[in-house]
Image (cartoon, rainbow, N blue to C red):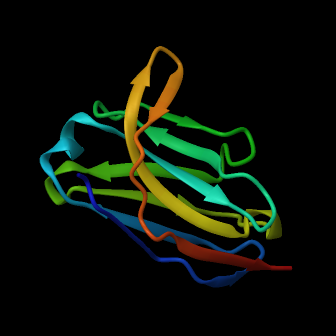
Amino acid sequence: QVQLVESGGDLVQAGGSLRLSCAASGSIFRISAMAWHRQAPGKQRELVAVITSGGSTNYADSVKGRFTISRDNAKNSVYLQMNSLKPEDTAVYYCNTGRWVGSTYYQNNNWGQGTQVTVSS
């Protein structure tokens, strides 16, 4: 079972930046696609960004051009650089492992505790 620990969330003003980190345990990391999801109050969890084991990336339209996902296989870590933050980015952010097949991300059922991002206007 992979364990995931997210960190880096904070309160930031609109237009600001944050960098989220996710540390993963287990050898599955290197062969897994990794993703960031977020869940705002009263809303369903949504997929934000995916990075494959080979480094290809995919983003939700709402964050394209503002967020960048990256990974460091040597550190079993995945990151989310978030720039030009907006109040609508406010949510709990979670990382997760999965598979990228064709143009679809198939998530595994492993989640960390999440990290809170709050963007004030």
Who's the residue at 50% across and 69% down the image?
Answer: 114
Residue situated furthest top in the rendering: 102
Q: Position of residue 68 (x, y in %)?
A: 52, 51
Who's the residue at 41% across and 64% down the image?
Answer: 112
Against 119, residue 22 (above or below) is above
Q: Position of residue 84 (x, y in %)?
A: 71, 64
Who's the residue at 78% across and 75% down the image?
Answer: 14
Q: Position of residue 59 (x, y in %)?
A: 60, 39
Residue 33: quadrant of the picture: top left
Against 71, residue 116 (above or below) is below
Could you tell me which quadrant the C terminus lies in?
bottom right
Looking at the image, residue 36 sits to the left or right of residue 16; the answer is: left
114 vs 51, nearest the viewer: 114
Against 108, residue 82 (above or below) is below
Looking at the image, residue 73 sits to the left or right of residue 22; the answer is: left
Q: Position of residue 63 (x, y in %)?
A: 68, 48
Residue 9: quadrant of the picture: bottom right
